[in-house]
Image: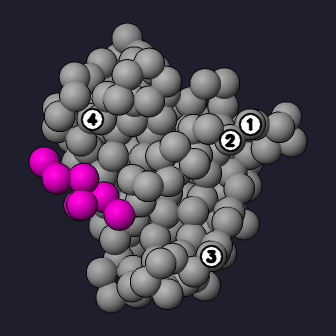
Amino acid sequence: MSMSRFPFFASLCALSCLPISSAQAQSWESNDWRNPQGLHALSVTVVQDQFALEISCTESAAETNELNLMFLGTPLPELMGTDGQEETLLVSLKQPDGSTFQIKWPAYYFDGGSGDQAWLGAIQGSSVFIQAFASAQTVELLNEDQAVAYSFPAKGTQAASQMFWSVCGIS
């Protein structure tokens, strides 16, 4: 599979090589900029321990509703991968009322060696996804067997959701 399918792949080192301050850890942070094509772009990231989850898009998402996802971290017992492996993961958003919103995430595993491993792919975002993300209490990644591979806190998802509306135009 060609890495050209993943325009956000260039941020892999940038994200994984940044020092994480305690203020940034465990809270979703939003950053917007102009990409090399001149499009307004957004990256929403949470870091916990040695793991990070990034959801990114550009203003072209208003037409495609595509959100790029990247999960960085070492292999986990519930999520092992080999370079080039493709797997359908689930992004699970636990809601305050106890319900769960889930969306399938076709992901590709990249293994560049120790400290350079990531699951990459895209989902079809929607207003329902953005609303569920905004109100989530936890954001979990599940493997194909629906076992929880990793769980992130949802602090900051409401503010990040506003950025998805304004920068990416997800509808």
Residue topped by disc 1? 19
Vertically, is 67 above or below 13?
below
**CB contact under 8 Å: marks 2 and 1:** yes
Mark 3–mark 1 distance (CA, rounded to whole Å): 20 Å
Q: Position of residue 34 (x, y in %)?
A: 57, 80
Q: Say if the magenta span includes residue 90.
A: no
Q: Position of residue 166 (x, y in %)?
A: 61, 85
Residue topped by disc 4? 109
Query: Camera-side residue: 163 or 114?
Result: 114
Residue topped by disc 3? 33
- Amino acid, disc 3: Trp
Mark 3–mark 2 distance (CA, rounded to whole Å): 17 Å
Mark 1 or mark 4, which has the lower sequence index? 1
Which residues lie in the magenta part?
A: 1-7
Residue topped by disc 2? 18
> In the displayed image of the protein, which residue is found farthest to the right?
23
Left/right placement of residue 23 relative to residue 171 reads: right
Mark 3 or mark 2, which has the lower sequence index? 2
Left/right placement of residue 148 relative to residue 105 reads: right
As helix, strand or loop, the secondary structure at mark 3 comes to strand
Mark 2 residue crowding within 10 angstroms, few (<14) / some (14–19) / many (20+): few
**CB contact under 8 Å: marks 3 and 2:** no
Mark 3 or mark 1, which has the lower sequence index? 1
- Amino acid, disc 1: Pro
Query: Camera-side residue: 94 or 42?
Result: 42
